[in-house]
Image: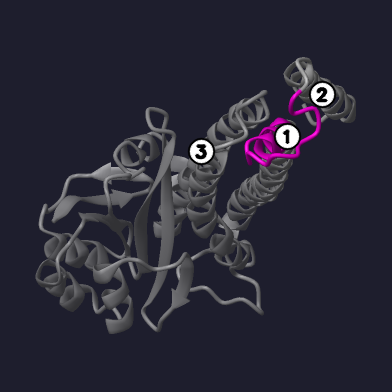
Amino acid sequence: MIVDCGIYRAGRRTEGPTDFSDALAEVRAAGDGFVWIGLADPTEAEFAHVTDEFGLHPLAVEDAVTAHQRPKIDIYQDSVFTVLKTAAYHPGDETVSIGELMIFLGDSYVMTVRHGPESPLRDLRAELEKQPELLEHGPAAVLYAICDLVVDRYLDVATELQTDLDELEAEIFSPGRARGAAERIYGFKRQVVGFRKATFPLMEPALRLTRAGAAEVKIPFVPAELRPYFRDVADHLAKVNEVVESLDRLLSDILSANLAQVSVQQNDDMRKISAWAALAAVPTMIAGIYGMNFEHMPELRQPWGYPVALTVMAGVCLFLHRLFKRAGWL
């Protein structure tokens, strides 16, 4: 569905047709300004009319409708197609949800297509309309503002994940909390890996946009004046990727340390079990021998034979207990 359609001239929104076809025709006829069209979760049928009107490339249309694309920037003859992954942190269950956002840049228009509930565009249009000096740069200014907002959200998510990881690390390495922690670590690592799939592939498109307008990098509809703006986005994204990389490495180290800790505890438990088994074996052996009811047994008919056997059992058990205690098995 079409969420909004607006005409912008000299960086300011102006009155005009609400139908995107009429709005685009008016802008192109006037030769100034651009149209910003916003769509949310469009179906193939809903997108067909837009495709015909704007002459979008079929491959880009297929990606925009089906979604589930990796971050990228594709250059076609009449448009530039950019895919971004949005991210939002949910403190209640400490999870990260990933959405998808596509941007089409073309002659006198910019079109945004969002998938998923996590959209950063709800308030962005209103904020941009307060910055006419930025919107004067045309449709590419909208692309910059969206990239900047998405990457800023990445920084927020990375900060929250870092805080959660510090808490998880402190809890896992508390005494007696090692067992059962592997599942929590794996769950947290899945969140980081999913977040990493959103941030890392975006670096290549971001760097291409920083070179827009240069002779060796031709990106239509992106003026060279916006290169410093995109460079700032790329710097922030690099910082995010550094944090995500460190989170991933630290999680792997924590998991290895946790598994080693569990292994040490299991070995300690096995030593204790072996020590108690040895303590029980001695009296069991002596009692078993005297329980065979042979006629000729040591001290069998002596009145002090029974106390002696018990004393020997207790003495051997006490000796073994002190031996295992000194060795750290008990």
Residue depicted at 52% across the width and 73% down the height = 219
User: Which quadrant holds residue 110?
Assistant: bottom left
Counting residues from the start of the chain, the first of labels 2 and 3 encountered is 3
Is 321 drawn above or below residue 110 in the view shown? above
Residue depicted at 39% across the width and 68% down the height = 69
Element on which disc 3 rests? helix
Alpha-carbon span between mark 2 and mark 1:
9 Å
**Disc 2 + disc 1, Cβ < 8 Å:** yes
**Badge 3 is on which residue?**
157
Counting residues from the start of the chain, the first of labels 3 and 1 encountered is 3
**Disc 3 + disc 1, Cβ < 8 Å:** no
In this image, 246 relative to 144: left or right?
right
Q: Nearer the viewer, residue 295 or 113?
A: 295
Task: Give the image location of residue 147, x and y in percent.
Answer: 48, 51
**Badge 1 is on which residue?**
286
In this image, 265 relative to 204: left or right?
right
Boundaries of the magenta span: 280-301
Alpha-carbon span between mark 2 and mark 3:
68 Å
Three-letter residue code for mark 1: Ile
- Whether residue 314 can be seen here: no
The number of numbered discs placed on residues in the rendered structure image is 3
Task: Give the image location of residue 156, x and y in percent.
Answer: 52, 35
Element on which disc 2 rests? helix
**Residue mark closest to the camera, 3 vs 1:** 1
Q: Which of 62 and 149 is in front in this view?
A: 62
**Badge 2 is on which residue?**
312
